[in-house]
Amino acid sequence: MSENKFVVAQDGDIEDGEAIKIDRAITGADDDIAVFFDNGEYFALNDTCSHATASLSEGWIENGEVECPMHSGRFCLASGEVLSMPASENMRTHRVVLENGDVILYPGVPAGVKA
Amino acid sequence: MAAKRLPSTGSVAETPKGALHRPTGIHHNFEVAGMVDSTSGLVDRAIFTDEGLYQQELRRVFAPSWLFLGHVDQLKKTGDFFTTFMGEDPIIVSKGKDGEIRAFLNSCRHRGARVCRADYGTTKNFTCTYHGWTYDLEGKLSNVPNVAGYDENFDTADWGLVEVAQIDNYKGLIFATWNPSAPELPDALGGAKYYMDAFLDKDPEGTVVVGGIMKWELDGNWKLAAEQFATDWYHVNMSHASALMVLSPTGKGPKSEIANTPGRQFHDEQGGHGAGFPTHPKSRFDAQKVHEHYDYGFLRERLGDATVEGPMTTGHGTIFPNFSYLPINGSIRIWHPKGPNKMEVWAWTILDKSMSPEVREAQRLYNLRTFGPSGIFESDDGENWSEVQSISNGFVTNSVALNLQMGIGSEREDGVYPGTTSELYSDAAGRNFYRKWAQLMDTPAWHEEPNE
């Protein structure tokens, strides 16, 4: 797994409160992955909201949470935990780190786990 | 409890008319078959806004149907009464000296004022405050001030309060109709009785009213509310997200398997009634004390496993046209029509007689907080109905059909829940509700002259 990593952006490419979407065709993961930049930290979650079909990379990002742009379900960026109905399933997290100005995504490696 | 009509009171048809007759066409009846397409699941939005259709509803939907009046517990002894409405007609329901429950039009036969202005109470008679005509508990005209001023043709026996054609109760719920040829109440309730029993028949001793009747006015056509309680579980996780979250132990809403529970939805093709319920055992909507009060083994034996695992979890129901209920928490309500754009909601809490006062109080407060006038669920629903109504009079808005297409073709007999059922998330009972509505709207009612 440790070999499966991607430089998805340079620090500064993603503005605060924004996110980018990494296509599953690039990572080989089973879903697109949203990489968020919120208050100086990077986070990554599966991109497709566990409730319906929305892209969380297009969601509202604030205070360590992302709110789905479609039905307003909310998730913790760090843990993927669901915080608000109508969503009821947690989101899968992925490890993302900043090294020497590179934003590095480890698809399939849960956040908080060393690659 | 079939109606006993005394010689002193009359049906609408028997009231003296003299030489009065209404000109042909004073009531214009629209043919509405083209406004409800129950096969395709489409409804014309004008059925919620048009004044002419509304007047026709009062004549052809409300006047011929069995309508909910109240609970037998509201009338304990002779002289007890309460007032309500059937459609927009004001009604007195009273307990006579013979112990019979009767329902009368609350309008003096002289100049038409109400003869009772109170919501409920105990009385000896009903005296009109305008000129003083007085009626006894059985509706008989018992006193006319200056009766000597009328000639010898005047007979008080002709001028009793106008009485409903039929009155009956189903397990404590009193219904009445102006329609002399309506099927008897149990037949009119039809297949819905099984689903109503999940809340009316848990206790061999029956049910009681706990607390008073909560009454509030709402912008919105009455059908929006009646339809939702018949058919709509679809709105729950979206509309009630915040309420479900506050009530959940985690603050984040029910677990996924409960939030996305399976379930069934029933509709009575003949009567237009509908009911839906989840079948997840933890999908419950009552105070913890109520849950602890029940002996589910006893209830399984009394009403069957399917009832306990289905309509007794939680859910919703509408008895056509405008009586709705929430089976598990005992919230019952009527959506009184007040013009096409307004309704008045009257809501009761009905609980088992053998519950302790403490358990009853817990559920009364639970209902007040959830489905009272400012209840956290009720206000979500009211907001939706008023929102829909507030824009419905826009010409273009009004011209665009509404969609009730979920679950088309899913209607079947499932071998577990009696009658025709569909999925929990379905518009089947809604399509049936509007089909029944259109059928009544296009059928001359009992009060219409043959050819009118």
Image (tube, helix red, strand yellow):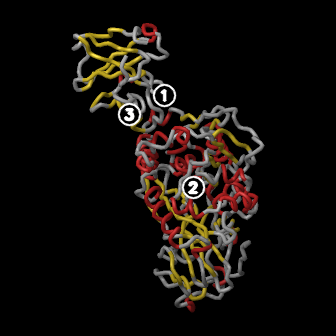
Q: Is residue B450 visible?
A: no
CB contact under 8 Å: marks 2 and 3: no
Discs 3, 1: same chain: yes
Q: Which residue is mark 2?
A: B326
| Percent position of residue B262, x then y | 62, 39
- The amino acid type found where label 1 is placed reads Ala
| Percent position of residue B100, x then y | 68, 79
| Percent position of residue B176, x then y | 66, 66
Q: Nearer the viewer, residue B448 or B70?
A: B70
- The amino acid type found where label 3 is placed reads Arg
Q: Which residue is mark 1?
A: A52
Question: Gap between marks 2 and 1, in whole Å?
Answer: 28 Å
Question: Residue, x 56% and y 34% (percent of image)?
Answer: B403
Q: Nearer the viewer, residue B297 or B46?
A: B297
Packing grade of label 1 (10 A; few <14, some 14-19, many >=20) is few
Q: Along the horizontal axis of the image, is B162 left or right of A74? A: right
Question: Residue, x 61% and y 42% (percent of image)?
Answer: B430
Q: Chain of mark 3?
A: A
Question: Gap between marks 3 and 1, in whole Å?
Answer: 13 Å
Question: Gap between marks 2 and 3, in whole Å?
Answer: 30 Å
| Percent position of residue B56, x then y | 59, 52
Discs 2, 1: same chain: no
Q: Quadrant of residue B413?
A: top right
Q: Nearer the viewer, residue B272 or B306?
A: B306
Q: Chain of mark 1?
A: A
Question: Residue, x 26% and y 10% (percent of image)?
Answer: A102
- Would you place residue B315 above or below residue B372 in this image? above
Q: Which residue is mark 3?
A: A74
Earlier in the chain: of badge 3 and badge 1, it is 1
Residue B86's disc number: none
